[in-house]
Image (spheres, coloured by chain):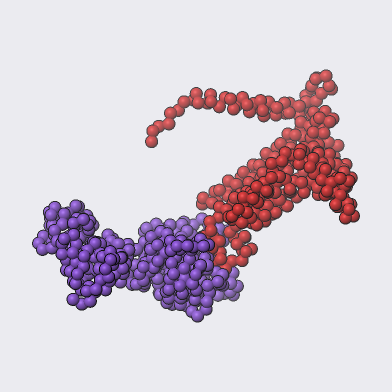
Chain colours: A purple, B red
Amino acid sequence: MARIKLDGIAHAYLSHPRSDEDYALKPLHHVWEQGMAYALLGPSGCGKTTLLNIISGLVTPSEGRLFFDETDVTHLPTEQRNIAQVFQFPVIYDTMTVAQNLAFPLKNRKLPKPIIARRVAEIAAMLDLTRDLNRRARGLTADAKQKISLGRGLVRADVSAVLFDEPLTVIDPALKWELRSKLKAVHRALDLLMIYVTHDQIEALTFADKVVVMNEGRAVQIGTPEDLFERPEHTFVGYFIGSPGMNLMSAKVSGSRALVDGSELQLGSAYPSLATGGRVQVGVRPDYTSLTAGAGLPVQVRRIADLGRKRLAYVTLGSHQIVATVPPDMASVADQANVTFDPAHTHVYVDDIRVAGVAA
Amino acid sequence: MTEKPINNRAWLFTLPVLAFVLFSSIIPMMTVVNYSVQDTMGANHFFWNGAGWFRDLLNPSTEIGARFNDALFRTLAFSLTALLVEVPLGIAMALCIPRKGWVVGVSLVVMALPMLIPWNVVGTIWQIFTRADIGLFGAALTGLGINYNVTQNAVSAWITIVIIDVWHWTPLVILLSYAGLRAIPDAFYQAARIDGASRWAVFLNIELPKLQKVLVIAVLLRFMQTFMIYTEPVVVTGGGPGSATTFLSIDLVKIALGQVDLGNAAAMSLVYYLITLTVCWIFYTIMAQIERRRDA
């Protein structure tokens, strides 16, 4: 039970990093609060596993310091850190039974037998493993094996945090839901700090209280799922979160108006003093971009995707390809149509960073 | 899927192999079988002897039976000793080789060198090496006041033959074990660190179980080679002192070519062959068993 503080943690796998590009993880300050569930979300190679391994001690950071509560653990080996980690592929000890597998971390720490037995029984019950406790772990299916891995991560009552490195990759989609909700329940029951690495946004958004979106070794936004959706702080968050991603259009912004390829659109706030010289873009999520028969900016409709619950129109606005929602009452869509953007959800980005406006 | 054409003429393609196996194995072996059931008074005149040679061979109270018994026991003891030293030593040394870096290549090549040396050369190297007058090893031990003499002292001779085999063939166990160790994903070691496992626990619970299959192969190969050991003792000790290092293969050659006792030699080589075959079959069964358990 602890809060974990990253103080300027950075890592390069090269011994003499020269440029920014050599860093797998760029300097990061963050505090992980006790009892919360975090997700580290980002594409492959963005540094999320590196960050996780730094916290667990499998990797020693090139720069910065790591604190568990007030203790500096930067150079402490994994064994002494009191941390649990579950890996992408199930790791089980072939020769042991399921119960012995679950007991292994406790046995290594020389806990008394009755306590071990009680913890193993509790965790097995949580993960539906009670029936298999006396079976050899080797013969089980991949998802049962991964449940054992999860169980070994959760069995220690005193851990500072449990880290998950894409633990559901090898699991069938149908079972994924079940295991994920099980993890959620375990999190609520055990009141642990959990950090969950994934590249699947749905997994991140459903599991976590707070999501850290990472790209190219940088944490680009840390926030609740709602923050990420409604107010992406970085264009990367805009198009990485949400399916499809945010519409981004280069624009000229003056006051509370933006000019996109000669068409003018209304913004929710005013931007009187935008830095000059930067690349200015406006971003609107497809959910707040609506196809209309009447007013709006003229667009070319390229195709319609019917998703069942809603329909999306892939349209061309000037030189931009964007996605708009087709209102349910619009029966047929002509090749030429108009779109409107919800001003309250239209954001302005300068060099990929969101700029807050002032009330117009 | 298209139907596979069935054409029995394809069997003709196997004819060259059949012919080769016929001349290299089957005909020589049937010749041995032929000798094992006949006796001769010389002049290439043979008569039927039935199972007589075998009956003598397997009866320890006969002269040949006692001789066979002793040689078999010696050979088994040698195989067992070599395995008991080479397998643990090979695993231990494989564990010492780092997982990456330039040291890996250097150590693997250096350790593989003994395996490249032909048996008789190995024998000659060690024969000179262990001589008490000019051999570095022998002279050093003698200088230290240790009673070491390969040609006169049975214990010295035995230990020397075992050391030669360990030196020559432990590298095989090292290479096989190292390959097996490298195949273990990093995640297992990381998980073990997270679980707080000691080095010994990692070895027992991760490395050893994952090495199981490789080790069965290593043990099989080492058993077969030590069970048929011939060249090194012949060159270094000549099977002596007395018959202390006269292993089955050496005794067989002595009977067949030294005494030209074809009936006894043929019966002995067939029994020798059957023992080897049985052991191989046992190993094969064990391997198949491991394979099945893995799939289950």
Q: Is residue B129 above or below residue A260?
A: above
The extreme left residue here reads A294
The quarter in which the C terminus of chain A is drawn is bottom left
Q: Position of residue B129 (x, y in %)?
A: 82, 45
Determine if residue A145 is in view: no
| A44 with respect to A345 (left or right) | right
Q: Camera-side residue: B140 or B4?
A: B140
Give me the residue at 47% from left, 78% from top.
A2
Residue B78: x and y in percent read 77, 46
Residue A341: image quadrant is bottom left
Q: Position of residue A46 (x, y in %)?
A: 41, 62
Q: Is residue A310 left or right of residue B72?
A: left
- In this view, the residue farthest toward the bottom is A70
Which residue occupies 44% across, 59% down? A143
Residue B199 appears in the rendering: yes
Residue at image location 18% in from the left, 71% down from the top = A256
User: Closest to the observer: A203 or A129?
Assistant: A203
Q: How many marks?
A: 0
Query: Horizontal and vertical percent for residue B80?
Result: 74, 49
Q: Nearer the viewer, residue A290 or A136?
A: A290
